Image (cartoon, rainbow, N blue to C red):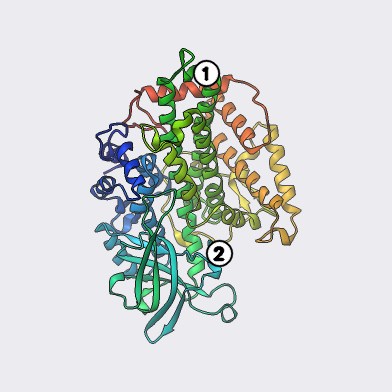
Amino acid sequence: MNGDALEELLGDPYDGSNPTGHAAIVAADDAGEPCAAGEAVLDAWQANAEYVPAELGGRLTAVDELVRRLRPVFRRDAGLGLGHGLTTLMASLNVWAAGTAEQRKHLAGRLLAGERVSVAYHELEHGNDLTRNALRAERRGNGFVLDGTKRVINNAGRARAAVVFARTADPAAAPGGRDHSLLFVDDLDRVPGLTRLPRLRTSGLAGCLLAGFGFDGAVVGEDALVGAVGTGAETALRSFQVSRCVTAGVGTSLLEGALFGVYRFATERVLYGRPVTAIPHARSVLAGAFIDLQVAQALARVAARALHLYPSVAGRYAAAAKYLAPKITENALADLAVVLGARGYLREGEYAFVGKHLRDIAGLSIGHAGGVSCQLTVLPDLPGVRPTGAEGALFDDSPLPELDLGELRVRAGRADPLLGALEGVADDELRAELASVRADAAALPVTERGVTASHRSLALTERYAWLLAASACLNSPRAADPQWTDAVLERIGLRSGRTTERTSTAALDAAYQDMADRAATGRSFDLDPEPVLRALA
């Protein structure tokens, strides 16, 4: 089954009788439970096959294609997409990257049978700092004994297996950061000394079943080890590059779904004798959000394709996309809430899902690596970064080479094809900003390139991410339309803070008309539009 089939299986989200429509999803969210009908649809679609490499019997080939195929579920419910399967992908990537042939085969079988796998990184005391995680796995005999706690773990209460990040050596005895390992703990209910901890409730992603694991002398065999002892952080950081791209990409679908909803509302809502869409400010907000969506998707898509084409630098792009795309999405959702007015705060009614999307994007953007964590991945790479040539396949939808997780690098190289593709554009302001970012990065003292970096130094990573977004847009197939290009450049200037005033309304008007035409003809607002099952009121 393909992505179009998933859209059909999920049905019209505005149909009040649809068990996977907005009304049912919001009701499940308010109850703090997963949408059972939605999970049944994803089971029927065999969603887990999306997370299994094709060589192991699944459907995973290209990361950008995975994002496209998951759009229908994230347009409707990020909690459903994350809770049903994205967490399973995050766990499985570690095994695809470093597991033995037997582990890979066994896990693929688990997933293709429809089972869930959890990933246990988080410890509340240490947040995103994996290097300080305290759960211990002491080697003993032909296995490991685990002691400690993992919290805020998605699906901890119902997963059949889990990939666990644990300390296997004291830092002093394992120089180079090789003091943590990954363990694939199977048949969780049969592991003595392992308990499932009570559920934790959240305001966003309320349907996700977050809980934890307690380990009190829990014993696992030697065959649980994923990769070599001490390589847990390295494997996790390589896996993060893929999951960051996927999360950044699917997160934009919350904006796509909300944008249609607010546009639909604005066409039917009458103020002062005319529809809200006739009010210039409302039209401007809607068109601006439409451009925001396409900028965020262009960046996320290029980052995903770079995993295949430029694995030595893809980690920097993945972190930049995971930082900026959710930020663009969240800001645009906040703008749309203004057009929706008081309805944006209601938990009932036809447009209550827009407020849910706004609550959910905050949690989705944190995931296993929040914004500052992503910035700290980018920052050390910036001094000495040099623009290089880029092949056109980075920007189009041509077939990609097979993803090789082993080629991904924890520290990206200084070569930068995305910046290189920006050097040839005609925009003088962008070229000047590129030169300024490179100069400022080169001047960073060593103390400003890591966790002690100031706010000013971290801001450099955002300026860099905006340059990547501009390059992704200006080299995309859509750049053949000069009005779209003008709208994108102006929007990037405004959102990044480089400019403060709109210079022309023509490009924004053209973007609004594009959006309106798509809404009327059943096409999505995505960078690459696709058929959607929804209609104007």
Label 1: how many Cα within 10 Å (few below 14, some 14–19, many 20+):
few
Q: Tell me which residue sits at (28%, 56%) in the image.
A: 57
Asked whether disc 2 touches disc 1, contact meaning CB atoms under 8 Å apart, the reply is no
The reply, left or right, for residue 133 in relation to residue 379 is: left
Q: Quadrant of residue 210?
A: bottom left
- Residue 97, image x, y percentages: 42, 63
Q: Tell me which residue sits at (39%, 36%) in the image.
A: 352
Which is nearer the eye, 224 or 401? 224
Label 2: how many Cα within 10 Å (few below 14, some 14–19, many 20+):
some
Q: Is residue 197 visible?
A: yes
The reply, left or right, for residue 431 in relation to residue 160 is: right
Q: What whole-number distance in Å separates the C-alpha atoms at marks 2 and 1?
A: 47 Å
Q: Quadrant for the C terminus, please.
A: top left
Task: Say what secondary structure mark 2 lies in.
Answer: loop
- Residue 425, image x, y percentages: 63, 34
The reply, left or right, for residue 499 in relation to residue 223 is: right
Q: Find disc 2 in the rendering and name its residue.
A: 129
- Residue 139, image x, y percentages: 43, 83
**Vertical comparison of 242 with 20: above or below:** below
- Residue 33, image x, y percentages: 32, 50
Q: Quadrant of residue 501?
A: top right
Residue 279 is labelled as 1
Task: Say what secondary structure mark 1 lies in.
Answer: loop
